[in-house]
């Protein structure tokens, strides 16, 4: 029986260009927030470009940024999101991102698998079309790993 890890995709529509003064606090927090993720218990992997983050990757449009990562389990991701420096960025998200255009989707992947942007986009589409299912869910509607 395979062991499972949790994948997550977070997409957000920028309210301002990433290099604008309005986004400066967000951009300046990226290195520390990403370092906190990398050091967090349960962290496995995250998508990053040469700069160490994924803000230059725009697979969903020029005004949308992505965060794609893999975690040991839901609780590891939840602790990182709500109980680390990430929380201070989360509190200000409405300043930087359009809340009606943000999507967070979670799904299970076999341990060792690194999801592609295409795979993540498919999971996001499943969530948007069908609501939470075992294939694509949210923190509010967590599904257990396959076979558990």
Image: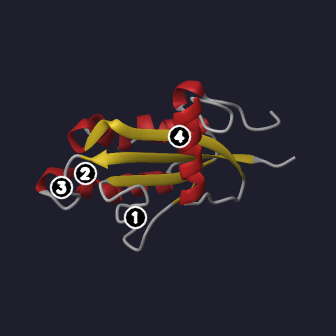
Label 3 sits on residue: 24
Mark number for residue 26?
2
SS type, badge 2: helix
| Sequence order check, earlier mark of 4 and 2 | 2
The quarter in which the C terminus is drawn is top right
How far apart are labels 4 and 3 at the CA level? 26 Å
Quarter residue 86 falls in: top left
Name the side, left or right, on which 2 lies relative to 59: right
| Sequence order check, earlier mark of 1 and 2 | 2
Name the side, left or right, on which 135 lies relative to 13: right
Label 4 sits on residue: 105
SS type, badge 4: strand
User: Please, which residue is most extreme toward the left here?
Assistant: 21
Height in image: 82 above or below 96? above
Height in image: 136 above or below 45? above
User: Please, which residue is most extreme toward the right here?
Assistant: 1
User: Within 10 Å of the Cα at label 3, are there few (<14), some (14-19), or many (20+) other Cα atoms?
Assistant: few
* Res 62 seen here: yes
Mark number for residue 57?
1
How far apart are labels 3 and 1 at the CA level? 18 Å
- Give the percent coordinates (x, y) of residue 81: 44, 39
Name the side, left or right, on which 77 lies relative to 53: right
User: Please, which residue is most extreme toward the top here?
Assistant: 140
SS type, badge 3: helix
What residue is drawn where x is 59% and y is 31%? 130
């Amino acid at each position: 029986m395979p062991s499972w890890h949790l994948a997550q995709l977070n997409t957000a529509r920028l309210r301002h260009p990433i290099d604008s003064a309005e986004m400066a606090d967000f951009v300046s927090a990226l290195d520390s927030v990403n370092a906190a993720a990398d050091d967090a218990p349960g962290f496995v992997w995250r998508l990053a470009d040469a700069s160490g983050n994924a803000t230059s990757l725009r697979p969903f449009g020029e005004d949308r940024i992505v965060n794609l990562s893999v975690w040991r389990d839901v609780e590891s991701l939840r602790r990182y999101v709500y109980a680390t420096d990430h929380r201070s960025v989360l509190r200000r998200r409405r300043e930087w991102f359009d809340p009606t255009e943000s999507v967070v989707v979670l799904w299970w992947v076999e341990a060792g698998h690194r999801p592609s942007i295409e795979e993540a986009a498919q999971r996001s589409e499943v969530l948007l079309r069908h609501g939470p299912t075992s294939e694509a869910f949210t923190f509010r509607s967590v599904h257990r790993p396959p076979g558990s």
